[in-house]
Image: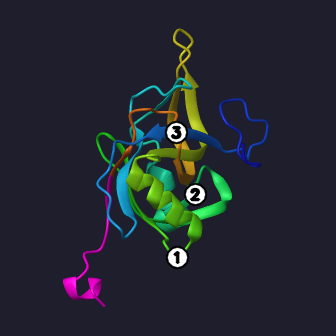
Amino acid sequence: MTSGFIPGRGAASPFARETKLLALPPARIHPGGLFEGYASLFSVADLGKDVVEPGAFRESLTRRGPAGIKLLWQHDPAEPIGRWVSLHEDSRGLFVRGQLSLAVGRAREIHALMREGAVDGLSIGFKAERARTEPRTGLRRLQRVDLWEISLVTFPMLPQARVSAVKALQRAPSALHA
């Protein structure tokens, strides 16, 4: 695991970030590196028994905006691979649109893996600001989180979340023969 990221619960540092993984469905692949999907689904328990509540990202998204939330590879802060074009909560969860920076070698590799269906997971990196644990079920309900980053990952914590589309800018036929 990458230094600075502490998975699961009970992080000792107030600055410790948690990560939650969400797999995305197979995608249409386009050469431009644009993709979209859900980084988190509301009211669905992940494999770590966390449930993100509707509105949990609202304050963080308002404060940071897409430019303030990093697009990383496997939660590694040394591996930025693009930028978030848009992030918003809807009735289902946190819907994201990202742009891989295809001038970066690692982003080109990841794009190729996405085209092959080998990588399709999304995972959130955050600090829980308000949460409550249900004693009977052990579920932790995340009511407010400070979202720091969203990563493309191999193994997501929430299996239902996957990249739903990978898009590209349309090229003119003459540009293909130049």
Q: Quadrant of residue 8?
A: top right
Name the residue located 26 percent from the left edge and 79 percent from the top edge.
171
Q: Nearer the viewer, residue 124 or 81?
A: 81
* Res 124 visible: yes
Name the residue located 31 percent from the left edge and 69 percent from the top edge.
168
Which residues are drawn in magenta? 165-178
Name the residue located 58 percent from the left edge and 55 percent from the top edge.
73
Question: Mark 2 or mark 1, which is nearer the start of the sequence?
Answer: 2
Q: Which residue is mark 3?
A: 21
Question: Mark 3 or mark 1, which is nearer the start of the sequence?
Answer: 3
* Residue 138, placed above or below residue 174: above
User: Which is in the foreground here, disc 1 or disc 2?
Assistant: 1
Which label belongs to residue 72?
Answer: 2
Which quadrant would the N terminus be assigned to in this image?
Answer: top right
Name the residue located 44 percent from the left edge and 50 percent from the top edge.
58
Question: Mark 2 or mark 3, which is nearer the start of the sequence?
Answer: 3
Estimate the x, y position of residue 76 in percent, counting from the top left.
66, 54
User: Which is in the foreground here, disc 1 or disc 3?
Assistant: 1
* Res 88 visible: no
Q: Residues within 10 Å of mark 2 (few under 14, many from 20)?
A: many
Does residue 177 show up magenta in the picture? yes
Q: Which residue is mark 1?
A: 103
Which label belongs to residue 18?
Answer: none
Disc 3 versus disc 2: distance between alpha carbons? 13 Å
Identify the secondary structure beneath mark 3. strand
Estimate the x, y position of residue 130 in percent, counting from the top left.
57, 36
